[in-house]
Image: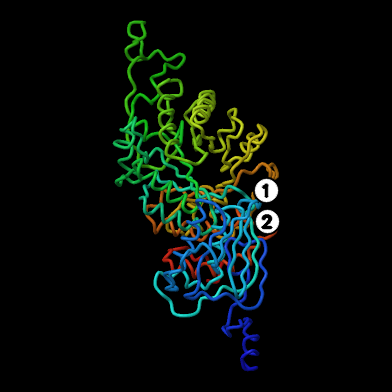
Amino acid sequence: MKKSLWILALALGVTVSSCQKAVSPLTEVSFLPIPLSVSSSSGGFELDSDASIQLVGASGDLKKVGEYLAQKIQPATGLEIPIVAESGNIILELKTGEPAEKYLIDISSDQVKISSGSASGLFYGVQTLLQTLPAEIESTEKVAGDWIFPSGTIIDEPEYAYRGAMLDVARHFFSVEEVKHYIDEIARLKMNYLHLHLTDDQGWRIEIKSWPKLTEIGGQTEVGGTEGGFYTQEDYAELVAYAANQFITIVPEIDMPGHTNAALASYAELNPGVNLPDGDFSTMTEGKIDFDILDKEPEPAELYTGIEVGFSTFATDKEITYEFVDDVVRELSALTPGPYFHIGGDESHVTEKDDYIFFIERVQEIVKSHGKTSIGWDEIATAELLPGTVSQFWAKEENAELAIEQGNQVLISPAKYAYLDMQYDSTTRIGLHWAAYIELDAAYDWDPVSSYPGITKADIFGVEAPIWTETITDRADLEYMAFPRIAAIAEIAWAPESKRNWDDFAKRISAQGKRWDIRGIGYYKSPKVEW
């Protein structure tokens, strides 16, 4: 190469490989979430028709990682990259004895190698590797040009084992394809749990074969009175399998004993009966109590399409309630390979405290009997928790501390930082703001440990970003409210506080925005970022 070209390359801040093609250096600005360590060297590995993916190690999941990588590379490059048993130059290697989610990427001019102790770790490494290529790799059509992985080394592993997103499909129903789209996007951010809020006052969204009216009646509508919907058990199993292919575990939630109006509208017997308050003699006739009124069977609730909370409750003193819960947990657990079952427990304002405690303690035992571990919103910590039960901190730090005092861990989802349905500011076209206005910097600039003096790292089960759908009606709304803030929460869940810096993140999220543009994600372009 002529000396003048070398000088120009240096002036532009690029390196030049032995094949004399300019390569942008490997830098942290490419990555979300940010890795632990990135080091660059000269040159790069060029993708061409000689590329092949070699799988090293014994795991049934290893092949799907290789297939995922090949599938992501093919559209923009036009390269059909084969998976081979040996002599490949893109190597995915399982290494025994390594931490499950830690991975190492080593790129030279001769090969690309990702190694990890598990297939999931390799999958996260693949997400990072794809981010080393130009944003145009996201295109669904072939893009002319050279495709070169810049040389260097990346070492990475997550801060928290549970990195989740929650999607409320009860207030407004989202189709199987819409949920799959959300799964695709959170997988790119190395999230590994999707918590589905399947039931609420406004709708029951999962088929329970032993209680068919839950969907026949309770699944009919949604907020605003528009037509609802539900997942058949086959639909749900399809979502579970689809998520698993991207190393995401589904956590189903049946919210109870409050937020249950859809169930109460479906089955009258789950409603509380008529109680005679002390001193109330309104049912007396000629000095005698009218027991016909007291023994009257409860009637089904009216279907509800508003957004107020706290008005519904199961009959916690009826055995039929626990038979119902057992059937629901049994059927849903049989479809859910993951270890967790979310029992809700929030905002049950009309349930008497003692009744609430009795209910939560009994339901935990039912969940345990079906081989699952309970997760519940932070109010459940006012009851006695079984060992391993997780309290999801969303509102009251004192409830989180109650769980910790019992020896249990907390899932961190503070509404004022992590609720993706909160408006960005007062001009946001949808969303609510009862917890806070949450601009992108507010969603990013907090920490699960340092922001909460009563919670230590050892107390934390993980981090989750919920999105409630009172005002979110379709995919466009979902994307606008979730992105870019979900990337902020994903980085908090993945990277240690020492690696996180707002100014740096603002640059990296801007680079990520180019990828979202190509994929057609309708994200909110925060004025805090130079897009």
Question: In the rendered view, would you say 226 is above or below 506?
Answer: above
Name the spot of residue 359 as percent of width and height, x first. Answer: 50, 26
Front residue of 415/326: it is 326
**Residue 286 vertical position relative to residue 5 in the rendered view, above or below:** above
The answer, for residue 86, to whether it is visible in the render is yes
Q: Residue furthest front?
A: 86
User: Residue 1 placed where, x, y %?
Assistant: 61, 91
For marks 2 and 1 on the same chain, the one whose residue lies earlier in the sequence: 1
Q: Quadrant of residue 182?
A: bottom left
Name above or below for residue 478 compared with residue 331. Answer: below
Residue found 62% across the figure and 58% down from its top: 103
Q: Is residue 488 visible?
A: no
Q: Which residue is mark 1?
A: 449
Callout 2: helix, strand or loop? helix
Q: Element under label 1?
A: loop
Q: Along the horizontal axis of the image, is 173 left or right of 104?
A: left
Residue drawn at the location 36% of the way across and 13% of the way down:
283
Q: How far apart are labels 2 and 1 at the CA level?
A: 9 Å
Label 2 close to label 1 by CB (< 8 Å): yes
Where does the image place residue 221, in percent across and percent down from the top left? 31, 42
Q: Which mark is residue 497?
A: 2
